[in-house]
Amino acid sequence: MPLEWQKLNYDIHTLRQVRREVRNRWKRILEDLGFQKEADSLLSVTKLSTISDSKNTRKAREMLLKLAEETNIFPPSWELSERYLFVVDRLIALDAAEEFFKLARRNLPQEAWGSMPGRWPERTALPSISKSLKERLRDRMGILP
């Protein structure tokens, strides 16, 4: 296997690991909020997913940015994904977004990044995969950004 394919495989594996860890962090907080049975369905986003109310879009985007800035729910180099905009929209519709934020802030505080047991690995720089490769992966594997 050529070296560039090995690097690509490593990058894809690393990206999947980070995505899995982000999803697990969201799921743990949802379960702590009492959504044990619903956590997987709340996190499930497909190409057919829609925003529940267009009025909530701005609020969902603001909440997502706040989560990224004030918590450790995403790694430092993470590009915010539209996937979690849908999840926050669902939380707003369930009137649970503020509680989710409070729990995320308490359980995954940004300032404790280096000393947390659930902190991100030392090598947090996500692999840089070209945009065309990301699109091909998304199309082939159903991976959303």
Image (cartoon, rainbow, N blue to C red):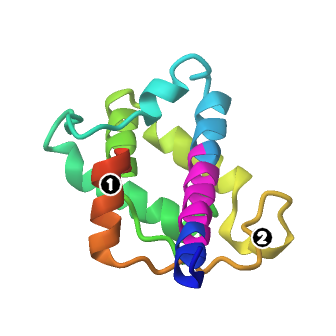
Residue at 44%, 25% (x, y): give it: 41
Q: Which residues are magenta?
A: 10-23
**Residue type highlighted by circle 2:** Ala
Q: Quadrant of residue 126?
A: bottom right
Rendered view: 48 above or below 114: above
Rendered view: 50 above or below 137: above
Residue at 86%, 59% (x, y): give it: 117
Residue position marked by numbered label 1 in the rendering: 138
The residue lying furthest to the top in this view is 37
Residue at 66%, 38% (x, y): give it: 28
Q: Provide the secondary structure element on which disc 1 rests.
A: helix
Residue position marked by numbered label 2 in the rendering: 112
Q: Provide the secondary structure element on which disc 2 rests.
A: helix
Residue closer to the observer: 3 or 138: 3
Residue at 65%, 76% (x, y): give it: 124
Q: Position of residue 131 (x, y in %)?
A: 30, 75
